[in-house]
């Protein structure tokens, strides 16, 4: 297992504000890694340092084996970036834009294939101004992947999407991941992280407060479950045993049975609550 | 280097295409100096004291200079401020595009737009106001070097000024003020003979005055030289000042250019 991103002791300060305070992070080649955290937690700052947009104050950072603070053109060609807010080139068509960006890369994909991959073939001749918000984001992704990146950054990619558009977008991300692209995703949607990410890190107050797979994050897999039935409820670490006892008591179906483990959202809110 | 040029030219064609697709910008950028030329040419009729040069011809020379500066300085500076605001620059900075290619694209597209602007102004001046096009090669050569140097200097100044406005919304106001002021003191609208000498000295620091002076040498000919403050078009000085602005503008650009809005980096 090789490492795509390696960070040790990253710090960044804006005047009096410590945005990132000693952050460690390892992201493996080929995984989908989600970074969660409230606004102002240092999430964007961290990602922008990894993308080579911002300078760090201290710490060791390696992205695809290169210090992004010294980003070269060759390194940029291996990294795709899909930004949060971009409203540019509204009067160009989708095809013109993707074709133009393809010229920046030494080994770009076929623009029409990329447009098909993001599901915009029918809109290829349309001006970007005429697209819906979701379609625009697909153009952003097309521009992010046209250079065949080994590593793709997606910054809150589905904000403002309707549920169907989100599902389609998730399929797109999964297919990119299946091709071997390492994906670093920041998001506010915990269901999105759960659906897409192999591993998740929660950033709060400029540090990573928890890291793991979505199903085990913050001790989620072993956390006590809440068992509810028609005549009562219980918090228990061994819900199976409780259900067995109840089944005997009711001699068959337990009326109104529900077993709930904490959702990723519960765990997340606990984590960022503790940190504040 | 070749990549910078090829991608720069691809960007120039993209920028030019983008410009022409914003129809309102096209109409206003091109028509503004033309409308002024028609207006001034119609209001102020007659010759300039004993030289056989009409006021309309004088305005033609001045407005060609102002028109080029409108495209290269004003249009460019506002365009870059918008690029910075809407995410164009940030997106480009995240790609392997050679950064210089962005500037090549802006400069070349300004050159194309300026050439169209000059052609339109010349057409109007010749048809409506009997402007005589130069007949000898040396004047055409002067026209080309004055416009090229002036355009490049104005464009670099525009790139530097684009970093002043906080965002795209304030860009038009911030950029237009120096442009309009310079036109008033550089002999475009008001004859420099009517300005106090200290204002003429201020104008002499900036490129527009020199660009207009060079253009007058092309279109007013030897008879017009007598109207100049020094009695001469001072072409070597025109070349020197425009050249200095080119070099200074380049330094200023490199020192001030930002790929993101203020407070974002």
Image: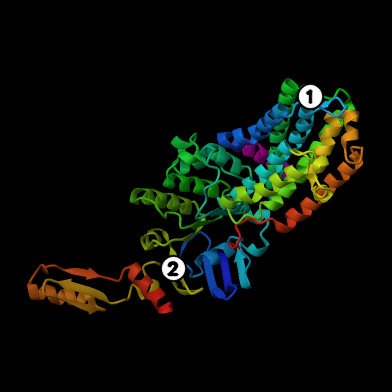
Chain label for disc 2 = A
Q: Is residue B11 magenta?
A: yes
Which quadrant, please, contains the C terminus of chain A?
bottom left
In the drawing, does residue B245 fall left or right of residue A69? right
- Quarter assignment of residue B118: top right
Counting other residues with Cα less than 10 Å from the Cα at mark 2, is it few (<14), some (14-19), or many (20 or more)?
some
Label 1 residue SS = loop
The answer to whether the residues at label 1 and label 2 have Cβ atoms under 8 Å apart is no
- Name the colour scheme: rainbow
> As displayed, is residue A35 above or below residue B38?
below
* Overall secondary structure of the magenta section: helix
Q: Which residue is mark 1?
A: B131
Left of B253 or right of it: where is A232? left
Q: CA distance from mark 1 to mark 2?
A: 67 Å
- Judge the density around disc 1: few (<14), some (14-19), many (≥20) Cα neighbours within 10 Å: many
Q: What residue is shown at x 83% (from left), y 33% (from top)?
A: B216
Residue B207, given in percent of the width and then of the height, sits at 79, 45
Q: Quadrant of residue B233?
A: top right
Residue drawn where x is 42% and y is 55% of the image: A159
Where are the magenta residues, as a range? B1-18
Q: Examine the rendered structure and indicate whether residue B15 appears above or below residue B196.
A: above
Q: Nearer the viewer, mark 1 or mark 2?
A: 1
Write down the residue under mark 2: A38
């Amino acid at each position: 297992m090789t490492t795509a991103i390696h960070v040790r002791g990253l710090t960044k300060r804006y005047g009096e504000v410590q945005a990132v305070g000693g952050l460690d992070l390892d992201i493996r080649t080929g995984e989908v890694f989600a970074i969660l955290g409230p606004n102002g937690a240092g999430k964007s700052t961290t990602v922008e340092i990894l993308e080579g947009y911002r300078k760090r104050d201290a710490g060791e950072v390696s992205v695809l084996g290169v210090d992004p603070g010294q980003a070269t053109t060759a390194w940029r060609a291996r990294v795709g970036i899909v930004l949060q807010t971009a409203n540019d080139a509204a009067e160009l068509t989708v095809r013109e834009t993707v074709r133009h960006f393809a010229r920046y890369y030494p080994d770009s994909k076929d623009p029409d294939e990329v447009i098909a991959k993001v599901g915009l073939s029918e809109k290829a001749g349309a001006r970007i101004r005429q697209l819906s918000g979701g379609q625009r984001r697909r153009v952003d992704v097309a521009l992010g992947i046209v250079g065949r990146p080994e590593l793709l950054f997606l910054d809150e990619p589905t904000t403002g999407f309707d549920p169907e558009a989100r599902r389609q977008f998730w399929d797109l991300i999964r297919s990119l991941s299946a091709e071997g692209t390492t994906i670093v995703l920041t998001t506010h949607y915990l269901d999105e992280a759960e659906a897409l990410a192999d591993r998740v890190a929660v950033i709060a107050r400029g540090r990573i407060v928890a890291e793991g797979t979505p199903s085990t994050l913050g001790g989620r897999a072993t956390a006590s479950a809440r068992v509810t039935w028609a005549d009562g409820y219980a918090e228990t670490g061994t819900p199976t045993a409780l259900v067995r006892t109840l089944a005997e008591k009711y001699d068959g179906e337990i009326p109104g049975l529900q077993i709930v483990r904490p959702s990723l959202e519960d765990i997340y809110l606990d984590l960022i609550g503790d940190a504040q | 280097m070749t990549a910078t040029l090829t991608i720069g030219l691809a960007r120039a064609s993209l920028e030019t295409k983008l410009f022409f697709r914003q129809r309102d910008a096209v109409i206003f950028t091109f028509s503004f100096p033309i409308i002024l030329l028609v207006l001034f040419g119609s209001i102020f009729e007659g010759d300039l004291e004993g030289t056989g040069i009409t006021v309309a011809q004088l305005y033609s020379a001045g407005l060609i200079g102002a028109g080029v500066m409108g495209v290269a300085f004003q249009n460019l500076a506002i365009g870059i401020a918008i690029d910075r605001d809407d995410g164009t620059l940030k997106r480009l900075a995240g790609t392997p595009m050679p950064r210089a290619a962005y500037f090549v694209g802006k400069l070349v597209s300004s050159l194309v737009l300026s050439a169209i602007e000059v052609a339109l102004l010349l057409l109007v001046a010749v048809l409506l106001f009997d402007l005589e096009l130069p007949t000898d090669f040396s004047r055409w050569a002067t026209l080309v070097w004055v416009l090229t140097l002036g355009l490049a200097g104005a464009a670099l100044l525009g790139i530097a000024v684009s970093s002043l406005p906080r965002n795209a919304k304030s860009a038009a106001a911030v950029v237009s003020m120096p442009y309009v002021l310079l036109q008033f003191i550089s002999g475009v609208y008001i004859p420099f003979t009517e300005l106090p000498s200290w204002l003429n000295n201020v104008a002499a620091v900036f490129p527009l005055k020199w660009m207009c002076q060079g253009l007058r040498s092309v279109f007013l000919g030897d008879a017009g030289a007598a109207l100049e403050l020094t009695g001469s078009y001072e072409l070597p000085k025109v070349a020197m000042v425009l050249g200095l602005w080119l070099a200074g503008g380049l330094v200023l650009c490199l020192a001030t250019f930002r790929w993101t809005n203020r407070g974002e980096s």
